[in-house]
Image: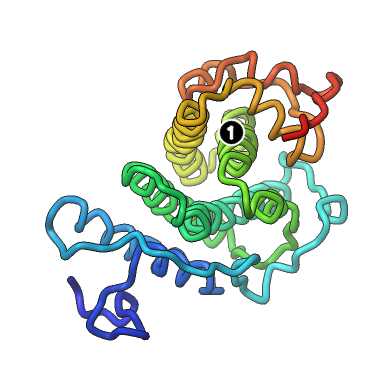
Amino acid sequence: MTSDASQTNADSPDRPLSLAQMAQQVLTTADGREKTTLSRRHAAHWFAYRAGDAAKIEVGTASPPLHPARPDKPELLNPRDVPRRRPGSEAGRKALLHAVAHIELNAVDLHWDIIARFSHVPMPLGFFDDWVKAADEESKHFNLMCDCLEALGSYYGELPAHIGMWRAAEDTAEDLMGRLAVVPMVLEARGLDVTPGMIEVFRKAKLTQAVDALEVIYAEEVSHVAYGSKWFHFLCGRDNLDPKEVFHDLVGRYFHGHLKPPFNEEKRAEAGIPPDFYWPLADGIPVKPPALR
C-alpha cells in the first residue's frame, strides 16, 4: 500500500482506509478536478488490491453526507431556471459541454455514494468492483469535458447548472433497489438516448476533440447502465421478485415525471433493459401508481 495520506485512516493511522471511507472522502471533496483525481487514485488502489498487488482493503462502512461537497461555481438553479441556448451556436455548444461536465461530476458522486451509503448491505465484491470502475470512468469523463471547455476558452463553473440531478439520490437514500432503478436504469439510460445527437452537433461544428470525448463517454456509459440492470436483477432474484413489476413500482415511486422517447433501444438492450421495462412509462402513458409494500 502507498503511504499517501489520502489512503490513511485518521482514526487508526496504521490501518488503510476502507472502501466506504474512500467513497466518503471523494464525496466530501469540493473541487471537481481534485475530486476526480482522488476518485481515480482510490479506484486504482481498490483494483490493485483486487488484483493481489496491494494489501487487503475492507469494504467497511461510512456516514456519507446527504449532499456531496461542491465548488462555489457553478451556481446551482432549479432546472426550469437554467438558461437555454441553441446548440448550433458557439455559446450553445459551450453550454452543452458544460451541462455534460455537470452530469459527469454528479455521476462520480452518485457512484461513490452507492458504495458508501449501501456498504452495509450484503453484496458480492463484484458489486463494489462495478461501481468503483464506473466512478473511475465518470471521473475521466468529467476531465474530458473540462478539457473540451478549456479548449473553447471556457471552464466548468462559468455557467449555471441545475440542482435536479441529486434529487434521485436523496429520494433513494434508504432504498438500494430504488437507487439502481432510478439512477443507472432511468437517468443514465437517458444518456444513451441523447448522446448520439450531441455527437452530431459537434461533428457538424468540426470540433473533433468534443466528438472524440463524447464517443468515449457513449461507449462506456452502456456498462454503467448494465451494472444497474445486473444488480437490480440480482436483488430481485434474491428476494424472488418480478423485476419488471418492481421496476415500474420504483420508478413510479421515485422518478418525478415520465420517460421521454425516442429511446435508443439497441443500446438499452445491450445494457440489459428490455423495451417492456421503459415503454409503459413513456411520456404520455400514465405511470403505474406505486404499489403499497
Secondary structure beneath dot 1 equals: helix
Quarter placement of the C terminus: top right
Determine the residue located farthest toward the left in the rendered image: 53
Between residue 206 and residue 9, name the one nearer to us: 9
Q: Position of residue 235 (x, y in %)?
A: 49, 34
Please give left or right for residue 56 compared with residue 64 in the image: left
Q: Quadrant of residue 16?
A: bottom left
Determine the residue located farthest toward the top in the rendered image: 276
Q: Is residue 113 visible?
A: yes
Residue at figure coordinates x 28%, y 85% from the top left? 13
Q: Position of residue 56 (x, y in %)?
A: 20, 62
Quarter placement of the N terminus: bottom left
Residue at figure coordinates x 77%, y 33% from the top left? 292
Asked if residue 244 is positioned above or below residue 90 in the image, the reply reads above
Asked if residue 245 is positioned above or below residue 105 in the image, the reply reads above
Q: Quadrant of residue 149?
A: bottom right
Q: Position of residue 90 (x, y in %)?
A: 69, 49
Between residue 158 and residue 118, name the one nearer to us: 118
**Residue at the spot of label 1:** 185
Residue at figure coordinates x 80%, y 40% from the top left? 256
Residue at figure coordinates x 70%, y 20% from the top left? 262
Q: Is residue 205 visible?
A: no
Q: Position of residue 47 (x, y in %)?
A: 25, 54
Between residue 247 and residue 293, name the one nearer to us: 293
| Total residue callouts | 1
Amino acid of disc 1: Met
Please give left or right for residue 278 compared with residue 117 in the image: right
Please give left or right for residue 256 compared with residue 208 in the image: right
Crowd around label 1: few <14 · some 14–19 · many ≥20 (10 Å): many
